Image (cartoon, helix red, strand yellow):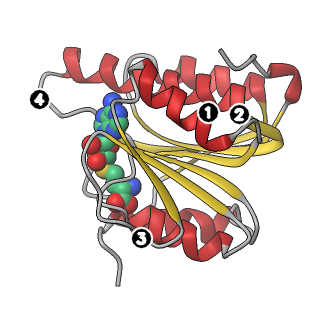
Amino acid sequence: GYRSRAAYKFLEIDAKDRLLRPGMRVLDLGAAPGGWSQVLAAGVGSRGQVIALDLLPMDPVPGVVFIQGDFTEDEPLERIHAALNGEFVDLVLSDMAPNISGMRAVDQPRSVHLCELALDLATRVLQSGGHLVIKAFHGEGFDQLVRELRRCFERVVTRKPDASRANSRETYLVATGFRSACRSPVR
Ligand code: SAM
């Protein structure tokens, strides 16, 4: 079994978009309690690498390097770069969501900000041709985010897994084929 229902969302996405391959190096942002990490570790196998990050602690997942920290701060980013040791990654995933205050004027910009940060990191660490999956919420800033993704990736699709139906505004953006012309330097 999996630790979270979220695992089934990623399984649905991967069944459609066939992102995971043995031997891949993967970054899992907003990983706790670890459902996606479990699926990822199994998919990349012993030759692969999974680096996971969350604000909250996470029980160890075999084969996963876990970093606890706030993705909006510099220190956890530095630890991600240190763990990568100069290697590019094949797949960046973000299931991060801000703590919901219930006020859309507060929650929507926070959520867009997390997406922008995930895209920014992806442009520094993704292999040419690599992929990015991010959870985004419909609302202000969503269309702009999709435009930025289209600039940096060959193909961008939105996915609404059945396991995600209960949350009407939540959507996953699946961007494949990273264009290396879009790459930013590691800071
Ligand atoms: N994909 C996970 C799984 O399969 O178990 C579920 C992720 S849960 C929906 C969203 C996670 O994003 C939470 O664990 C939360 O702590 C994390 N998160 C939100 N903001 C964050 C931030 N600024 N830095 C790191 N993690 C963050």
Front position among marks 1 and 2: 1
Q: Looking at the rendered structure, which numbered label has been put on residue 8? A: 3
Residue that label 1 marks:
81
User: What is the x, y in percent for residue 17?
Assistant: 68, 61
The residue lying toward the viewer, choosing from 35 and 14, is: 35
Residue linked to disc 4: 102
Q: Reply above or below: 28 against 104.
A: below
Residue drawn at x 68%, y 65% as measured from the top left = 20
Q: Residues within 10 Å of mark 2 (few under 14, many from 20)?
A: many
Name the element at disc 1. helix
Question: At numbered mark 3, what does the secondary structure look like: helix, strand or loop?
Answer: helix
* Type of amino acid under label 4: Gly
Answer left or right for 152 relative to 95.
right
Q: Is residue 135 above or below residue 57?
A: above
Position of the C terminus, as image quadrant, is: top right
Rounded to the nearest angstrom, the CA distance separating label 3 from label 1 is 29 Å
**Residue at the image point whose x is 17% and y is 33% from the top:** 100
Q: Label 1 to label 4, Cα distance in Å? A: 34 Å
Q: Disc number at residue 125?
A: 2
Asked whether the beta carbons under mark 3 and mark 2 sit within 8 Å of each other, the answer is no
Percent coordinates x, y for residue 176 in the rendering: 75, 45
Most foreground residue, 70 or 115: 70
Q: Earlier in the sequence, mark 4 or mark 3?
A: 3
Task: Measure how far apart labels 1 and 2 are at the Cα level.
Answer: 8 Å
Q: Sort mark 4 into few (<14), some (14-19) or many (20+) by Cα contacts within 10 Å.
A: few
Looking at marks 4 and 2 on the same chain, the residue that comes earlier in the sequence is marked by 4
Residue type at mark 2? Val
Instruction: Report the residue at 29% width, 57% height from top.
Output: 58
State the SS at label 2: helix
Residue 7 figure quarter: bottom left
